[in-house]
Amino acid sequence: MPEHLTIGMVVDNEFYGDHRVYNEAKVLVQAGYTVKVLCLNFGSYPDREVVDGIEVVRVRIALKKKKRLSALMLTLPFYRWFWRKAIHQFILTEQIEVLHVHNLYMARMAKEGISRNYVRLILDLHGDYSAAIMGYDWATHFPARLIVRPWLWKKLEEQYLGFANKIILINNDFKKDILTRFPYLNEKNLVVYPNVSDPANEDSTTVASQTGEPYIHHAESIQQMEPNGQQTVLSEYNACASHEDLDALYSEFLLNK
């Protein structure tokens, strides 16, 4: 059982249905950490609740507004401002010591929301976002591409990765790719944790996309979006995620408290 450490996870959905965040949060709760998740509320769930020991805090925003603001995040600063304020308040109110954000585009918002020097930032990359967004029709077709500017993510990737103290990657191939493209990164700060769906907990962690946006995984994780909106992930990594690696990542922060 570790000494007390309060971890704040941040994800821009309603938490329910996102097996990636749930799986990691559950592992950390079972290891003895206090885990709080900051997410969104489109009007379907309570603003605060406890799910399997995970404290969930939601910020209200209309789904249509969220979609518009997130699509414009590289053109207008409103979505970034929204999250910066929410994260700042989350850290102060919930006494967060380590902030764990999911997906590349959340890195800058998290960095700007951290107002206390002792709060460390973990960036969890569930896939190559800068490459994946170039495959989205809604982002790459005219005239949307002029507003969304998907090509800019490739240029911003180095800066955004630099915001984090630690980076979690979905597999070793992705880690090698990141180190090849960004050799300035310290390999010791990159942790591989192949976080995919858990068939044993399918009832509680099946992904149902609340936003209509598919979740992103690296090439070695295969996705199938079914007609009812549920996602099943077929991957060779289903059984090889090392919970010890995730625990060790946070234990390092404990040693530096």
Image: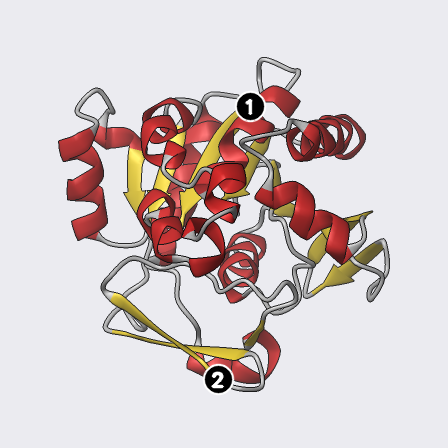
Label disc, if present, on residue 111 of the rendered structure = 1
User: Is residue 97 placed above or below 170 in the rendered structure?
Assistant: above
* Residue 3 drawn above or below residue 185: below
Q: Position of residue 18 (x, y in %)?
A: 57, 64
- Tag 2: Cα neighbours inside 10 Å, few (<14), some, or many (≥20)? few
x, y percentage for residue 100? 53, 39
Q: Name the kind of residue labelled 2 in the image.
A: Glu
Is 203 located above or below residue 159 in the figure? below
Q: Residues within 10 Å of mark 1 (few under 14, many from 20)?
A: many
Q: Residue at x 53, y 27 (%)?
A: 108
Q: Which residue is mark 2?
A: 226
Q: Nearer the viewer, mark 1 or mark 2?
A: 2
23 with respect to 44 (left or right): left
Q: Determine which quarter of the picture holds residue 239.
A: bottom left
SS of the residue under disc 1: helix
Choose the circle earlier in sequence order: 1 or 2: 1
- Viewer-side residue, 151 vs 56: 151
Quarter of the view holding residue 190: top left
